[in-house]
Image: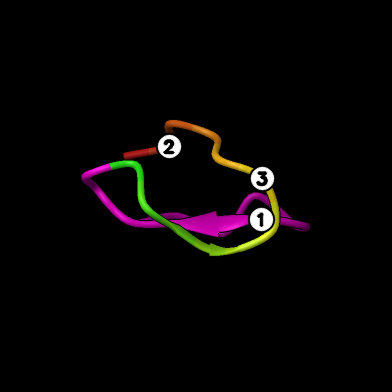
């Protein structure tokens, strides 16, 4: 998963914190 600066998401699109952004 990549860090978008505000939101961190996993490859399955699961939010670690913040909103769900599909970043793989």
Q: Are marks 2 and 1 in contact (CB under 8 Å)?
A: yes
Which label belongs to residue 7?
1
What kind of element bears circle 2? loop
Q: Which residue is mark 2?
A: 23
- Measure the C-alpha gap from mark 2 to mark 3: 11 Å
Q: Which residues are magenta?
A: 1-12
Tell me the quarter of the picture where residue 23 sits: top left
Residue 20 lies, in percent from the top left, at: 55, 40
- Measure the C-alpha gap from mark 3 to mark 1: 6 Å
Q: Are marks 3 and 1 in contact (CB under 8 Å)?
A: yes
What kind of element bears circle 3? loop
- Label 3: how many Cα within 10 Å (few below 14, some 14–19, many 20+): few
Which label belongs to residue 19?
3
Name the residue at the top extreme: 22
Mainly helix, strand or loop, the magenta region?
loop
Residue found at x 24% / y 47% = 11
- The residue lying toward the viewer, choosing from 17 and 24, is 17
What kind of element bears circle 1? loop
Sequence order check: which comes first, mark 2 or mark 1?
Answer: 1
Residue found at x 70% / y 57% = 18
Q: Which image quarter holds the C terminus?
A: top left
Left or right: where does residue 15 sit relative to residue 5? left
């Amino acid at each position: 998963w990549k860090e978008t600066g505000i939101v961190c998401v996993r490859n399955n699109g699961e939010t670690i914190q913040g909103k769900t952004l599909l970043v793989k």
